Amino acid sequence: MPRPTQPILSTRNITDAALDAVDATGDFTMPGIAKQLNVTPSSLYTHISGRSEIVELMRIRVMSSISVPHPPAGWSERISAWGWAYRRAAVEHWRLIPLLMTRSVRTEVTFDIDTALVQAFSDGGFNSTDTRHAISTLDSLVLGSVVKLSTPDVAWTQSSNPSEVTREAANPLRTDDTFDFGLRTLIAGWMAQCVVRLYTESHSDLPVTSR
């Protein structure tokens, strides 16, 4: 019998099988992966340590598809590009998000992306505390828009009698428009903070006059 050109088992095809299961059902099991790959569950452990490592491998797969522009792109353009890239990657495997949110981040690729995002906010004049608040807010917008995909197509029953504006906003086809509006609103607010900060700093040496 000729030898297979590729190994039957690898971290790559284990990750592929886990992602397939999560995309279909929202979760995965070791026996389920083994069955899909036509191997025994015990043989999986020659390549991975267990469930937690598989979750991290899936995180790496998703986060590796995200690219963050570097200077000379402006800080707000970099943040906008990151938001859209993150959302596209998350939407592709939206059922995976709850699994990722329940576990601490351990992957270097995620830290690299986070460092680039911190640098973008730093270039915009944000201090470390405000940067962390801003990143958390942006993360909430992205993940919230992805979780929205799991809601029913019809969010309101006829007996609910929602307003026309609410009914249109619940349309899943408007998800991109809603995310775009939220992202633009956040960035506009952050840019306004920069203007206020620059104005305050440039006028900090003016004498205070009493009325």
Image (cartoon, rainbow, N blue to C red):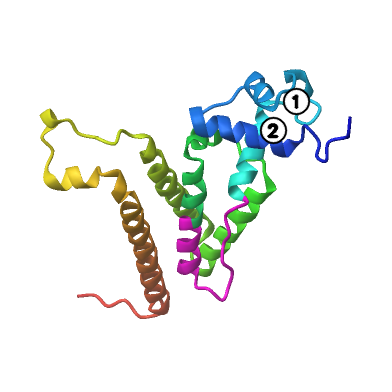
Label 1 packing within 10 angstroms: few (<14), some (14-19), many (20+): many
Specify start and end residues of the magenta stretch as a single range. Answer: 64-84
**Left-right relation of 92 to 189:** right
Q: Secondary structure at mark 2?
A: helix
Give me the disc on residue 168: none
Q: Amino acid at mark 2?
A: Ile
**Within the image, what quadrant is residue 33 found in?**
top right
Q: Is residue 70 magenta?
A: yes
Q: Nearer the viewer, residue 40 or 27?
A: 40
31 shown above or below 2: above
The residue type indicated by label 1 comes to: Leu
Is residue 178 rendered to the left or right of residue 96?
Answer: left
The residue at the point 50 percent across, 37 percent down is 97
Residue 38, horizontal then vertical, whole percent = 71, 23
Q: Quadrant of residue 149?
A: top left
Q: CA distance from mark 2 to mark 1?
A: 8 Å
Looking at the image, residue 18 lies above or below residue 196: above
The answer to whether marks 2 and 1 mark residues whose Cβ atoms lie closer than 8 Å is yes
Q: Residue at x 11, y 28 (%)?
A: 159
The location of residue 52, given as percent across then percent down, is 66, 29
- Mark 2 crowd level (few <14, some 14–19, many ≥20, 10 Å Cα): many
Chain-order first, disc 2 or disc 1: 2
| Residue 46 screen position, x and y as percent | 81, 27
Q: Identify which residue is drawn at 50% across, 56% down.
A: 85
Determine which residue is flagged by label 1.
Answer: 44
Q: List the residue tagged with mark 2.
A: 14
- Judge left or right: residue 100 versus residue 209: right
